[in-house]
Amino acid sequence: MEGIDFSGAEHRKVLIIGTGPAGLTAAIYSARANLNPLVIQGPEPGGQLITTTDVENYPGFPDGIMGPEMMQKFEAQAERFGAELRWGMVTHVDFSERPFKALVDEESPVTADTVIISTGASAKYLGLPNESRLLGHGVSA
């Protein structure tokens, strides 16, 4: 990240990269600890649960919950405690010295005392003709 001026960069105690269940859980806990976390949402806000229909194996939802609704609840809870969720993509990081450095969308520099990486995984599909139509109805990734 040579040539990027971090002298006027936004600084946070905690920077969280990713907004799936792990990232938002980290946001909830760090926000409750008054660590003022900044959460960068990335290309798939909410993670794979956004494309999940019934979530029936998560505690606290005895009747199940739809994946997108669950992730909205995670986001609302994180924001309630003071986490800031921001659209963007972390395009570069430098962990060679403290504070750690990150570049969001190739242009916005951020420094942080702690960086939590919770980027998760992306579903892989085969590209079959009826695959998307049957997703969640017998077809899964």
Image: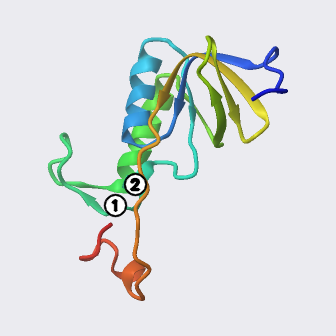
Please name the residue that numbered disc 1 is placed on. 52
- The residue at which mark 2 appears reads as 48
Question: Image quarter for residue 11?
Answer: top right
Q: Please name the residue shown 17% across and 54% down the image.
A: 63
Q: Residue at x 41, y 65 (%)?
A: 124
Q: Nearer the viewer, residue 103 or 21?
A: 103
- Give the image location of residue 77, x and y in percent: 42, 32
> Does residue 37 appear to the left or right of 105 in the view shown?
left
Q: Position of residue 120 (x, y in %)?
A: 41, 45
In this view, the residue farthest toward the left is 62
Q: Nearer the viewer, residue 90 or 53?
A: 90
Q: Secondary structure at mark 1?
A: loop
Q: Identify whether 31 is placed above or below 17.
A: above
| Quarter of the rendering containing residue 29 | top left
**Type of amino acid under label 1:** Thr
Compared to 81, does 22 lie above or below?
below
Q: Are marks 2 and 1 in contact (CB under 8 Å)?
A: yes
Q: Residue at x 40, y 71 (%)?
A: 125
